[in-house]
Each structure stands twice: as structure tokens, then as C-alpha cells.
Image (spheres, rainbow, N blue to C red):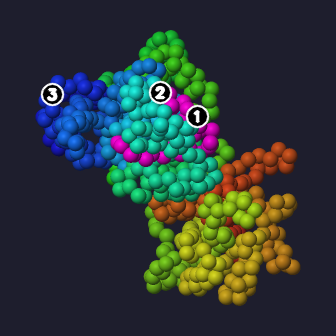
């Protein structure tokens, strides 16, 4: 939209003017607000700070009894500035101009991926209070993972802001409204409900809310988040705010970040013109700050000159997504950048924290720690530019390719179709597990290529359907052998043997104390596997790109099963063991393991040979 504003690009990004400071006429103000709202709708995927002055227009309206009432129209940031008082003072946006789009844009879903102590909880509290104050009969819901976090937010953020704000305290609070820890009422009929949802979303069920806040998103069970979001399904204008501090790349907050616009606060360098992404590369050596050779604050990663965070602007790294995601780091906040003592504290964290902790806590960046046997980046390196075969639409071309190519082997890891939220008869939460079929082949002497993956979910979890469908796919594609999990699926394995023939089904059983990596049990008609050793072999192959995966966009949903696995050292056994959280399935990993191991056994490949060739050029 064209604008007649002749200010410089940086002047246009100055903080909005507080409520009531404008001297323009009511009609001009109303037109200006409408024009700004239209502009924001047209630039939904390119979030920028407001380019018009923040104004409030006073409109006259008549009540049913003929009396006149005044309607105030303003941006949310102006209401926050006018209504919210913290520590006895109005909430000030000076130095916080990066917050203005978060308040003023009419986005339905907002995600904050932040470092610690950057006012994310204050942002949530301000939104809840102002919306409840301005909109009569509004219903809002705040949910955190734990009871103690919800109680702390209610007492420290909500109650202190309400009690410390003169207008809200005088006109919107009295002895008749609820002031409980988990329920806050207002005299205009609005309510804020507060709940916790650590293992289950049951405490949030039954609440209908127009505004939903999910705090500390990284600690939620990812299967519970859609359940909680159903609380807003009644309202077409519902808004959802999600916030938290990231951990690893397979954490819930990173999952939603990948589905967001990924807005980053880029800061220009006045010396060389480079726009800087705020991370550890923008922090100079400690000695330069200690000797006052540099002012406290970030520097340009190209020329090393100081840069000023308030000069920055939001830029979307993944435009077109429905969730507006914002990353806020400690580098950009005004109570750290520009203050020597605070900046030196940040430098101490940079120099003494493990980098993963510094990336999470201070920079608001996800990081895969050493406890992960393989990282997301390493899996991406294994991905090619091909697509998987569609198990629901196997074409004649695919069948021809399968029968003319090298021998195919399949792997099946059996699961019950649980998402990690169900409870058994004893009340214990069941481990998330799904049946997964993987088919692939060796494309040369070293590399095993994944060709088809199917995870049985929803209505397809019925065991009879699963077995029949797996046999159908294997028969159509001419799969030579199928490796299956014995421990969980010994019953369905017998059915599969009757359908495919006993010579085409290879059973595997993991044993924790097996001295050999692999041992045949003729009586049980199955292979015994040394679980940790065999899993380490597969991680080795992936790290050395001896496993080929399809395009990352296709493979990412299955890669989560691999990234869910973590390693820990058992001191009493003096060995590394692998495990996963009960809410995060690892079924594809084991399905892949059985499929590739079956190929190795059939072709007579030894691990020694694989290790010898892994360092030679392909």
C-alpha cells in the first residue's frame, strides 16, 4: 500500500505514541487507524513495526436509555501503556519496540521462542488483562505444564499487574468478582481461567475460551497441545499465544517453530550495511568489553563494529505460514544490551555455560546436545532429492522398478497405536507406539536406500488390517524378506508367516546381556540381538551417510522417531544405553533397523567391511 510518509526507514520504526498524546481530529484518527489495519492485513506475511502514530479515537454512541457513552478505539499497545502499571509506573515501550507488532497485529496464532527473562510471561499477562478489560464478557485460558508454574504466574504476573494498575483496580475489580488463584474475574463479565496440564489436558477440558495462552510450551506433551487448543474452537476470532524457551530440535516448541513464519529481529550495521542475525557470532571477545574498547552490546558479524538492537526490524524467514513466530534473545532486550554490568553477566554465561545451555537460555535457539546419538543436521545430510513410494498408491511403474531392481527387504516394528496420552487399566500412562513398515535396498556396496515408509495411525491401527496391508504391500513389490519384532508381535508374526510363508519372515528379539551382536536361536526360530550394540551400529551408519533417506520435507515426520532417542551412560554397567520418553515414539528407527539388518544377513555383509569402506570416497 502506498504511503505519503516521508520519514526515513529507521524513523518509521520508532515506538508508538502513548494513549492520548495525539492532537489530530477524531475523524482523521479513525481513518488513520482503519488505514493502518488494512495495511497490516495486506502485509500479514511481512511483520513490521507500525508506520503510523499510535492514536486513540473517541467515538460517541447512544445507550438504550438515550444517554451518551464514549467509545475509545486504539491499538492494544496503547491500552497496555495506559492501563498496565508495573512497579508503580506505566508499562513503557522505550527500547521495546520489537514488542509492538506482537501486541498490535491481529494474528490468530503467535509463537514466542525466547531466552530466559525476556518478559514473555509479562507479555502474556498484559494481553490477558488488557483484552479482559477492554472486551466485555471475554473468556481467556492460561495453561502451563505444572501446577506451581500456573500458581506463580497467577500471583506474580496477573495479581500484581491488576492490583498495581489504578484504572483496572478502581473500575474493573470489586468484592463481588472472583480473585482466586485459578480464576480471575472482572466487573465487565470477563474471566481469566488458569490451569495446568503436565501429563494430561483433563484440567482444561470443559472451558470455552476466546483467548488461549500456552506458557512453557517446551515442557508440554506434544500430543496434549491440540487437545487444549480445542477450547477455542467455538470462537471464529479466537487467538492462541504460545511461548517458551527451546531445548533440542525435537522439542514441541521447535516443532511449532518449523510451522511458523520464523520472524527474526535483524539489526543493520551503519558501518558496512550488513543486516545481522542475533546469535553468538554478534558477541565480541570478553576482553574488548572489559577494557572498554567496545560499548556493551552486540557487534556486526562482518566488520566487528557496534550495532544498535533498537534499529532492527522483524523479517520473516519462512513467509506464508499461519503461525506468526518470533524469536527474542537476551542480546536485544534493553535491560541487558547497553548496560555494562548486565552485559558482562551475559558474557560470563557465554564463557562458562555449556554452549547448548547458552543457546537455549540466552539466545532462544534450539540445540542438540551430546546426549543425542545423532543430530537433526546429520539426518538432513543423509537426505537426497528423491521421493518415497506411496504405500496407498503403488503404480505399475513402481512395481516394475521394484521387481527389476536389487532385492528388497522390509522391517516392521509393532505398536499399539497409542499417542502417549492414554492410560492403562492401572492408571499408568501408556508409551506412545505405532506400527511402522519400512522397505529399502542396497543401491551399491555401501549405501542402503529407504524406499517406502508407512506408519499405521488412526483407523488403520486395527491389527488385522495392519497385517493384511503389510502382506499386500510386500507381495505387490516382491519383497524378499521381512524382518519383524518378536518381543511385541509374536502373535501377529505367526499370522504373517502363514500369509507370506515362514521362509520370508525373520524374527528379532532384543536381549540386554547378549555377549555377541547377533545370535541365531534355532529353537525359538529367531535372532537374538544385543540391543545397544545393534542400535549403535545403525547410528554409526547414519552418521557416515551409509543410509539414504528421501527429501527432508517428506522424511521429517519419520525423523522425529530417530531424534526422540537419547543416550545415557550407565556407570554400574559401564555401557551406553538408549532410551526415549514415553510420549515420543521411536518405532521408525527400529523398523529401519530390522529392514537393513535383514539385508545385511541375506547378503552376508559384515560390520567390519562396512567400517573399512565408510571412510573411502563413494
Label annotation for residue 604? none
Please say if 227 is above or below 13: below
Name the secondary structure under disc 3: loop
Instruction: Say left or right for 118 vs 566.
Output: left
Pick the quarter of the image with the N terminus: top left
Q: x and y percent of residue 134 in the render?
A: 34, 38
Displayed quadrant of residue 408: bottom right
The residue beneath circle 3 is 24
Mark whose residue sits in front, 3 or 2: 2
Name the secondary structure under disc 1: helix
Label annotation for residue 163? 2
Please say if 590 is above or below 220: below
**Distance from Cα at disc 1 to Cα at disc 2:** 16 Å
Residue found at the very far front of the displayed protein: 65
Q: x and y percent of residue 59 in the render?
A: 19, 36
- The answer to whether one can see residue 517 in this image is no
Magenta residues, as a range?
A: 135-161
> In the image, what residue occupies the spot 62% across and 49% down?
198
The residue beneath circle 1 is 152
Pick the quarter of the image with the C terminus: bottom right
Classify 10 Å Cα crowding around label 1: few (below 14), some (14-19), many (20 and above). few
Tell me, yes or no, whether the two marked residues, 1 and 3, touch with CB atoms within 8 Å: no
- The answer to whether one can see residue 72 in this image is yes
Residue 147 is inside the magenta segment: yes
Amino acid at each position: 500500500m502506498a504511503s505519503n510518509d516521508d520519514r526515513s526507514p529507521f524513523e518509521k520504526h520508532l515506538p508508538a505514541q502513548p494513549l492520548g498524546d495525539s492532537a489530530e481530529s477524531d475523524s482523521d484518527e479513525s481513518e488513520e487507524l482503519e488505514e493502518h489495519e488494512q495495511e497490516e492485513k495486506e502485509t500479514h506475511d511481512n511483520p513490521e513495526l507500525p508506520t503510523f502514530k499510535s492514536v486513540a479515537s473517541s467515538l460517541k454512541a447512544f445507550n438504550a436509555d438515550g444517554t451518551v457513552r464514549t467509545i475509545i478505539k486504539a491499538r492494544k499497545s496503547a491500552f497496555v501503556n495506559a492501563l498496565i502499571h508495573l512497579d508503580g509506573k506505566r508499562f513503557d515501550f522505550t527500547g521495546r519496540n520489537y514488542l509492538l507488532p506482537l501486541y498490535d497485529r491481529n494474528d490468530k496464532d503467535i509463537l514466542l521462542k525466547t531466552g530466559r527473562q525476556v518478559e514473555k510471561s509479562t507479555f502474556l499477562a498484559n494481553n490477558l488483562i488488557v483484552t479482559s478489560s477492554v472486551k466485555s464478557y471475554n473468556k481467556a485460558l492460561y495453561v502451563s505444564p505444572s501446577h506451581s508454574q500456573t500458581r506463580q504466574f497467577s500471583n506474580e504476573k496477573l495479581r500484581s499487574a491488576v492490583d498495581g494498575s489504578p484504572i483496572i483496580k478502581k473500575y474493573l475489580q470489586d468484592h463481588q468478582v472472583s480473585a482466586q488463584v485459578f480464576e480471575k474475574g472482572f466487573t465487565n463479565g470477563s474471566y481469566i481461567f488458569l490451569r495446568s496440564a503436565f501429563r494430561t489436558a483433563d484440567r482444561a477440558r470443559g472451558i470455552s475460551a476466546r483467548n488461549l495462552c500456552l506458557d512453557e510450551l517446551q515442557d508440554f506433551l506434544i500430543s496434549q497441545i491440540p487437545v487444549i487448543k480445542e477450547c477455542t474452537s467455538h470462537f471464529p476470532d479466537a487467538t492462541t499465544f504460545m511461548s517458551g524457551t527451546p531445548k533440542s530440535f525435537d522439542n514441541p516448541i521447535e516443532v511449532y517453530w518449523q510451522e511458523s513464519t520464523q520472524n527474526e529481529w535483524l539489526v543493520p550495521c551503519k558501518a558496512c550495511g550488513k543486516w545481522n542475525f542475533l546469535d553468538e557470532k554478534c558477541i565480541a571477545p570478553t576482553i574488548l568489553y572489559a577494557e572498554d574498547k567496545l560499548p556493551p552490546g552486540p557487534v556486526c558479524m562482518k566488520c566487528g563494529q557496534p550495532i544498535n538492537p533498537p534499529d532492527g526490524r522483524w523479517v520473516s524467514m519462512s513467509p506464508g505460514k499461519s503461525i506468526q513466530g518470533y524469536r527474542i534473545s537476551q542480546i536485544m532486550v534493553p535491560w541487558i544490551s547497553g548496560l555494562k554490568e548486565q552485559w558482562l553477566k551475559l558474557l560470563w554465561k557465554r564463557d562458562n555455560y555449556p554452549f547448548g545451555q547458552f543457546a537455549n537460555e540466552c539466545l532462544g535457539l534450539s540445540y542438540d546436545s551430546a546426549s543425542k546419538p545423532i543430530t537433526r543436521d546429520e539426518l538432513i545430510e543423509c537426505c537426497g532429492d528423491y521421493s518415497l513410494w506411496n504405500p496407498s498408491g503403488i503404480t505399475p511403474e513402481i512395481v516394475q522398478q521394484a521387481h527389476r531392481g536389487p532385492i528388497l527387504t522390509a522391517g516392521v516394528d509393532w505398536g499399539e497405536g497409542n499417542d502417549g496420552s492414554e492410560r492403562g487399566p492401572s492408571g499408568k500412562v501408556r508409551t506412545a507406539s505405532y506400527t511402522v513398515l519400512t522397505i529399502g535396498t542396497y543401491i551399491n556396496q555401501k549405501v542402503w536406500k529407504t524406499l517406502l515408509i508407512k506408519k499405521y495411525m488412526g483407523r488403520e491401527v486395527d491389527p488385522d488390517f495392519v497385517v493384511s496391508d503389510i502382506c499386500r504391500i510386500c507381495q505387490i513389490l516382491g519383497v524378499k524378506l521381512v524382518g519383524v519384532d518378536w518381543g511385541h508381535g509374536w502373535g501377529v508374526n505367526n499370522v504373517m508367516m502363514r500369509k507370506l510363508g515362514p521362509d520370508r519372515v525373520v524374527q528379532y528379539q532384543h536381549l540386554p546381556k547378549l555377549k555377541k551382536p547377533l545370535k541365531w536361536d534355532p529353537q525359538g526360530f529367531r535372532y537374538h540381538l544385543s540391543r545397544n550394540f545393534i542400535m549403535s551400529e545403525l547410528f554409526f551408519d547414519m552418521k557416515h551417510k551409509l543410509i539414504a533417506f528421501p527429501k527432508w520435507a517428506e522424511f521429517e515426520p519419520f525423523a522425529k522417531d530417530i531424534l526422540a532417542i537419547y543416550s545415557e551412560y550407565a556407570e554400574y554397567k559401564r555401557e551406553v544405553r538408549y532410551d526415549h520418553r514415553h510420549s515420543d515414539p521411536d518405532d521408525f528407527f527400529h523398523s529401519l533397523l530390522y529392514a537393513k539388518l535383514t539385508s545385511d544377513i541375506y547378503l552376508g555383509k559384515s560390520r567390519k567391511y562396512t567400517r573399512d569402506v565408510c571412510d573411502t570416497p563413494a
